[in-house]
Image (tube, rainbow, N blue to C red):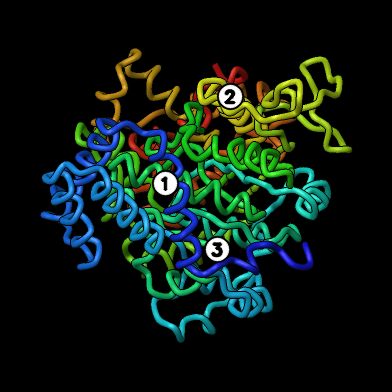
Amino acid sequence: MVADPALFRAPPATEIAAALAARLRRRLAHTSDTALTDLLADTVFTERKRLGHDGGNPAYSAAVDDAARALHLGERPAMERAAVALVEQYALEIHNPFSVRTYRFATRLMPGLLTRLLSATRARDLVSTQADVASRVRLHGPIDRLRELAETSTLILAPTHVSNLDSPLLGYCLYAAGLPPFAYGAGLNLFENPVMAFFMERLGAYTVDRRKRNRLYKETLKDYSVEILGRGHHSLFFPGGTRSRAGRLESKLKKGLLGTGLDAWQESIAAGRERDVFIVPCTLSIGLVLEAESLIADALAEEGKQRYIIMDDEFSEPRTIATFVKKLLALDAAVHVSFGEPMDVMGNPIDAEKRSLDPHGQPVDRRGYVCDRTGAVVFDEQRDHLYTQRVADRLAEAYQRDFVVQSTHLAAWAAWRTLRDTRGGTDTWKLVRLSPDEAQVPRAAVLKHLAEGLLALGSRQRALPSTAEGVLDEAIARFASFHRRRAIEAIGGQLRLAPELVLYYQNRLVGWPELK
């Protein structure tokens, strides 16, 4: 691991607040009166509406009221002061100081601490849980190369997002891979478990309040990401934004924070202290997902189109988390984490010397993408948006390429195809509403589809049993270990399905050319 990671020298929240306020002031110098009024009005309107339902801390509520008064006065200096005060409040909420002492304590207890951390509902639970995490988590990819890059460059880890358990899991994987700690954004709801909150706040997590949807808050989050990347802090963020509700691998990625790597790199060139920023895809494959039932129900419900945060899923119940983690880690190789090949912030692959490569594999000077002939950076928002789109496309390709198929995914895929065949191609909405007695399919038909799937996957079946019977038996056993409803259950020569859960797990394979 890097001897002295930049995150170990993370500044206090007051310093970060001052830096973000300075960024806003520079931006306001080029903002018209009308644009400033619109920015502040959006904040006041959305936040007063939200605070009426959710409440808020007194200092923040006062800052919103001050912004409203400044709008009423219509004086630019007052509006600028109000905007800066709001950003300072946001910065204090977002930033959590990293604790080297807590990190060293945690790493001494790794990997057992991961299980205890995820399972604990009380402090004393931290010393009571026994499980062998290392034997249940498989790491794949160019890990030695990533260690080397982390010494001299800033890395952005861009993982798929399956569960609220992803962040602590990835924290363990970074440690197990010999990589330094990464800063990462964690939704406010993840801090409700007091034991997890204690560690997350001290081990690199910064707080993201997704209830705040105003533009000024979103801009502050981006500024925060640029600021910490510019300070050399390796960062992790989920390009999908939130957990995949329907269970699919992310293909349409949010580009907000993803573009901050490009911003930070350009700023470093302009400041004469260039530091490379590279993006690393990371694909999670988990045989069972704690929140599967709530996620797929939300994806299917009409209100799911509007709900962005689920506050009342299985993750909100500490004892449910404990039960799930213990059962998940009782499975053999239950989790596969695949680190992909690193790329530059324009989406180009890089070689062993950290040179960017063009589509023909030839080295190119990546500064030419953002600098003029004199070497000066030319900031161009529209151009950068296109570069970030290229990065998003490359990430989506990596997720498909690196995903490790598990028995629960392939068995669900075969069961869903069989259910669809026996029901004459009935649409999804009708299939998921079938009762357990109606959602029964012949075991032999599922095995036929499984055999076809194994053949189609070829070398991509590395984590699967070699036979259709083996895949099905393993999947049935895994499904029986946790969910209240079994996704697939053997009843003589028939299989009884829980259609919503089958849909969720089979969706992980949607879009795969091998499994059309």
Return the disc, 3 or 2, that comes first in the chain's sequence.
Answer: 3
Pick the quarter of the image with the C terminus.
top right
Gap between marks 3 and 2 measured at Cα: 28 Å
119 left or right, relative to 36: right
Return the disc, 1 or 3, that comes first in the chain's sequence.
Answer: 1
Residue annotated with mark 3: 204
Residue 38 placed where, x, y %?
23, 34
Q: Which residue is drawn at 39% across and 76% down?
A: 121
Which amino acid type corresponds to the residue marked 2 in the rendered image? Asp
Which amino acid type corresponds to the residue marked 1 in the rendered image? Leu
Return the disc, 1 or 2, that comes first in the chain's sequence.
Answer: 1
Q: Please name which of the two marks, 1 or 3, marks the residue nearer to the observer.
A: 1
Q: Characterize the local packing of mark 3: few (<14), some (14-19) or many (20 or more) Cα atoms within 10 angstroms.
A: many
Determine whether 147 is above or below 441 in the image.
below
Q: Which mark is residue 89?
A: none
Q: Characterize the local packing of mark 2: few (<14), some (14-19) or many (20 or more) Cα atoms within 10 angstroms.
A: some
Residue annotated with mark 1: 24
In-front residue for pair 82/418: 82
Residue annotated with mark 2: 393
Determine whether 354 is above or below 20 in the image.
above
Residue sticking out furthest to the bottom: 124
